[in-house]
Image (cartoon, grey):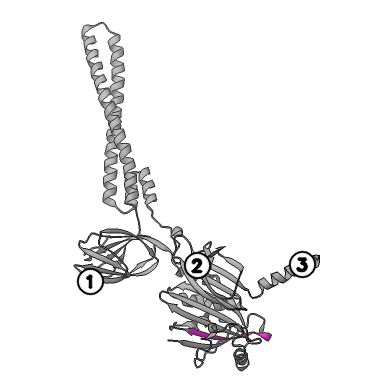
Amino acid sequence: MVRVLLSIFFLNNLFGASQDPTYLVFNHFDKEIPDAEKLLIENFNDSKFEFDASIKDIFSDLDSYDNPASSHMEMIKDLGEQYKVNFILLNKIEHKEDRFILDGLLFNTRSGGLIHRRKINLKHYLNGQINELVMWVGKTLGIQQQEWQENRESILFSDPESISYEKTPMGAAIRSLIAPGWGQAYSDKKVSAGVWFGVEASLSLAFVLSYLNYDKSAKGFLSNSVLYNGTDDEKLVAKYRSLAETDWDNHIIYSRLAIALASATGTGWVSNSIHAWIFGPRPYTNIYQEWDNSSKSNKG
Amino acid sequence: MKHFNKILFVSLLCSILIGQIKLDVSTIPKRVDVYLDGVNLGRSPILNERIKPGLHKFEIKKRGFAPLSYDLLVNPAQAIKLDFFLNPIYKIKFKTEEKGLVFELNGEHRWDVPYVRLELEAGDHSLRVFKIGEIIDEQIIRVDEPKRFNYYLKKPLTSN
């Protein structure tokens, strides 16, 4: 469907009220764009529009001329005189597969020539046509609003490198490195968080107990050695010797146990951090079969 | 002789410039390689470049974005400003625990393994699911960021 929209656009804000340049606007859209006129009025509310859909696509053959800038000079001049306007603005929007092309042309009715042309090639997004149309019209009028630029940015998909997430696998890994299970809890994996915290806490406790026993045995051995060397009583010599030997054996056992537990705790700590990274928070979407029931896909 | 050289130089310059059209190319994102008829014009934004009338081919390329090719008939006696918007390509993982399913995306790509990695242009994509040669599901999935899709035949009673 070719929709032709004719509007007369009176500018009051460029050169003062006494010599306002006036614009005749043609919108040629191959698909209906709802609220196009309304949004143009809203965005340029200092100007006056008049709409007339009776004129058909008079510039459809523009590119078939060797020199389109001067191809319709007489017609442009005639339209300028007929509508008493200084410029004619033509906005064409053509949809091709998943993209649309906005072709904007600005004619001067005094010379009849094409003075500016702008082509915008964009993937089709919600309200993208309207936003681009407003930006182009605004450009020809010398009006640009930051909001339009922000709208343009917002309707485009994000650059993969600029996407930032509230929760990241690295954030989970760092947390788990600080406190085992924290990264898993941060990723909303409560059971996993509990298991890792329990295992690491048990290993750490066992290590501390082993170290304390090692320390106690080492000190006991030294103490009994001193006592053993300081007495000539046979019974006491035998007793201190026995105690010192027991302490020596315990000191070796607890030493080895403490080293093993320290290794296990450290390895587990790092593994817990790696686990938090692997199973860290990442974006996902669950898709459920639609043909089987009326369920829709849920964003996870 | 000295003046003759100057006149010759100015004449040559004029002959080169006359008939050329001012060209500006802007892109989103910025700093994108812009090729005109296979020649690299540099990185966007391209300002005050000159182009001869006739049919030209623009190619816009940036890593992580779908390349764009655009044929343009440039007419004489006009300045032209082109705006190109590149669509990002996202890394997608597609996973299912269901058995015996064949997936088809956009009528082009098919797979029957439980886990695949894809690079898809941002936007809507058509997913069709087959089981024993028969289509059992068809729906549109929206790719709006790098992420993983999990496909299920049945919706659970309680979803987390």
Asked which secondary structure carries label 3, the reply is helix
Task: Give the image quarter of residue B140.
Answer: bottom left
Looking at the picture, do discs 2 and 1 lie on one chain?
Answer: yes
Asked whether residue A197 appears in the rendered view, the answer is: yes
Residues in magenta, as a range: A18-28
Which quadrant would the C terminus of chain B be assigned to in this image? bottom left
Q: Could you tell me how far apart the alpha carbons at marks 3 and 2 are, in whole angstroms?
A: 38 Å
Mark number for residue A281?
none
Task: Give the image quarter of residue A231.
Answer: top left
Instruction: Read off the chain for label 2.
Output: B
Badge 2 density bin: few <14, some 14–19, many ≥20, Cα 10 Å = some
Q: Is residue B8 magenta?
A: no
Q: Amino acid at mark 2?
A: Glu
Mark number for residue B59?
2
Q: Name the residue carrying label 3.
A: B6
User: Considering only vertical position in the picture, is A1 above or below A132?
Assistant: below
Asked which secondary structure carries label 1, the reply is strand
- Which residue is found at the position 73% from the left and 69% from the top? B10
- Which residue is found at the position 48% from the left and 63% from the top? B61
Badge 1 density bin: few <14, some 14–19, many ≥20, Cα 10 Å = some
